[in-house]
Image (cartoon, rainbow, N blue to C red):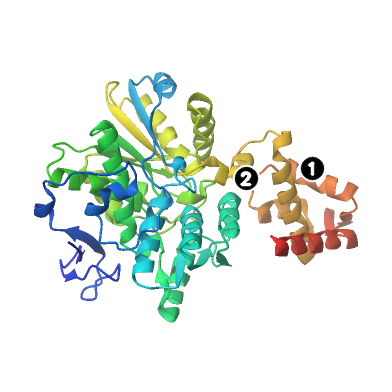
Amino acid sequence: MAFLQCNECKAKFAEYPPQYSCGKCGGMLEYRYDYGKLRKIRFRGPFNFWRYRRLLPKVKNIVSMGEGGTLLHKAKRLARQTKLNNVYLKDETRNPTNSFRDRCATLLVSNAVDLKRKAVICATNGNLGASLAAYCGKAELTCHIIVPKIVDMGKLAQMLIYDAVIEEHGEIVDESIKKAEEIAKETGWYQATAELNPLVIEAQKTVAYEIFEQLGVPDWIIVSMGSGGTIYSIWKGFQELRTIGKINSLPRMVGVQAEGCSPIVNAYLKNIQEPVLKTKPFTHALAILVRNPFHGKLALQAIKESKGVAVSVSDQEIFVAEQEVAKLEGIFAEPASSATIAALKKLASQNLIDKKDRVVCLITGSGLKATDVLQALTKKRKTAVVGLELSTKEKILRILSQKDTYGYELWKKIGKIMTRGAIYQHLNELEERDLTSSYRRNGKKFFKITHRGSKVLQSIDELKKLL
């Protein structure tokens, strides 16, 4: 039987409803089990998420779409490139909505149904929102999602098609989380935000169980870090396998963050307990764009206890890795997932990984969810980017509908995700179509939206209402 226990004062609480904060000391709560009764447990049933039901908190009404049981792909060509013998990719893009968050969604939505909740609330920067929207649709629950201003369009499209109620709040997901917490307290909706529900850790630890059944215990597991919960989940899964007597050794955990947003890596390098980020965070890998990692301490714990390492990689390294893993292994990974490949290359080049070591990189989500990011990173213009170009032109028109401005200011407002030359190319094309016009003031060339441009924006808004 499962119960919640405080990581600080060790106070115990009932299994349900799930809560993340200790009512006595304010510490973080985590699910624990009577491991003595689980020592002879056998994994039974089809190779999917619910195969591990006995190592999860109790569930009566299972809402499933066939999640889990994902491929552990032996990456032979990638291994040769990195001069390693044994590289594996845990391909979570094979899940129903193409990310590892389907593991969370099946457990969270099942619990919401058990508790007879009619609505779910979640703050997310992408994958969890897409997963929850799909599973709530299947369970006939209303799904309310709070997203930050910057979110991958592919993930937002999934939320929309699954009929979620979407609200934008904050620049990054940290602010969205606070809003979701307030809403849950006011409404009594089921709290499904990853940072605010301990069931998420339990759901994600099943990745470790599957790797064990597919490969045994690898020497290294490389995981991208946003809030830090994923790397800790997998570490917990392997620790539990050892506790119940299924394994004798543990993997070394590698946590990866983008250079522009690396509070956990900073704390690891400085050997301090609190993740720190003094500058404004930025990365194209939006799934790991988190300023204040909620599970940062636990992530550091996993890395240090396992004698692992934390490493940061640049956006350019991520983009190159994204192309390489697609070309070499046929897996289209989102930028956050590709960061693990970039880290693998870096660690291999530094000889921190032995040639004979078995290494698993976690591929958390599909690149199809973040094609706009892929195009923003590349400076090549191909016919395949028509959708992105239209999206950029729409952004330019919306900015100009508020205020006349000049090219450099437009470039900053769009987020500096492409060259200034590309911005001027879009402006020239808009002016050729009579959607914008230009004039000079104080030596600068200003642009303004035309009557025709305003009509185009109105048409786009009407179209969106029909979708």
The mark total stands at 2
Quadrant (top left, top right, bottom left, bottom right) of the C terminus: bottom right
Q: Secondary structure at mark 2?
A: helix
Question: Residue tagged by mark 1?
Answer: 425
Residue extending farthest to the front is 45
**Left or right of 403: which side holds 373?**
left
Work out whether residue 143 can be spotted: yes
Q: Residues within 10 Å of mark 1 (few under 14, many from 20)?
A: few
Res 163 → quadrant: bottom right
What residue sits 33% from the left and 48% below the top? 49
Contact? badges 2 and 1 (CB < 8 Å) = no
**Left or right of 461: which side holds 192?**
left
- Which x, y percent locates residue 233? 29, 50
Give how far apart the Cα atoms at labels 2 and 1 are. Answer: 18 Å
Q: Amino acid at mark 1?
A: Gln
- Which x, y percent locates residue 422? 74, 42
What residue sits 31% from the left and 24% below the top? 351
Work out whether residue 271 can be spotted: no
- Which x, y percent locates residue 39? 11, 47
Q: Is residue 186 above or below residue 208?
A: below
Mark found first going from the N terminus, 2 or 1: 2
Res 221 → quadrant: top left
Question: Residue tagged by mark 2?
Answer: 372
Foreground pick, 114 / 224: 114
